[in-house]
Image: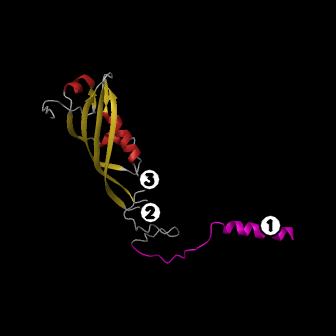
Amino acid sequence: MTKKYYDFEIPKNLIFNTRELIDVLPLKCSVKLDVKNFENILSKTLKLKETIVKLNFTGVGKEILAGGIIEGKISTQCSRCLKEIESEFSEEFYETLSTTAKEIDIMNIIQQTLALANEIQYLCSSECKGLCFICGENQNIKKCKCEEKKQSPFAVLKDKFDKKNKKEK
């Protein structure tokens, strides 16, 4: 059976006093986070729109199991066509913490989780054609008339070998 504590105030910085937290275990709570807490851990092109964390604390012997889900929206650019896009995310985390510590810093755990959850490439769609590498036209909107040279990346070496062979003859 889960105890309910309506008078337990969740710290805005998510640094909990361990003794106070132990007194209210098990604890489930949900907190809307200030996006400013994550400005220094995300890439410059990624902008956090909103973030909510759902926390669940349980006590196990001399340890506290902290887990939760971070959900929110980000704004960024498509890696291929540079169109502004908005994307939703949801990341789970679990951490075992000692009850001997004076404080439990959940914000640090959340920041680490978000930093590791960043995708390398965000796309507006899986079929995104991107920009023409010659003229810069967005190929999703209009097909440009630039000639696409289908040349092997080793073609440059062929020229070098041809020149070398001519010198040796």
| Residue under label 1 | 164
Where is residue 10 shown, x and y percent of the image?
Answer: 21, 33
Q: Secondary structure at mark 2?
A: loop
Viewer-side residue, 133 vs 161: 161
Residue at image position (37%, 65%) is 125
Residue at image position (25%, 32%) is 58
Q: State the image quarter where residue 87 is shown.
A: bottom left
Residue at image position (37%, 42%) is 113
Q: Which kind of residue does numbered mark 3 sit on?
A: Ile
- Compared to residue 98, the image places residue 108 above or below, namely below
Q: Is residue 168 magenta?
A: yes
- Labelled disc at residue 120: 3
Marks 2 and 3 in Cβ contact (< 8 Å): no
- Compared to residue 77, the image places residue 53 above or below, namely above
Q: In whole angstroms, how far apart are the C-alphas of marks 3 and 1?
A: 42 Å
In the rendered image, the quadrant that contains the C terminus is bottom right
For marks 2 and 3, the one nearer the N-term is 2
Viewer-side residue, 83 vs 158: 158
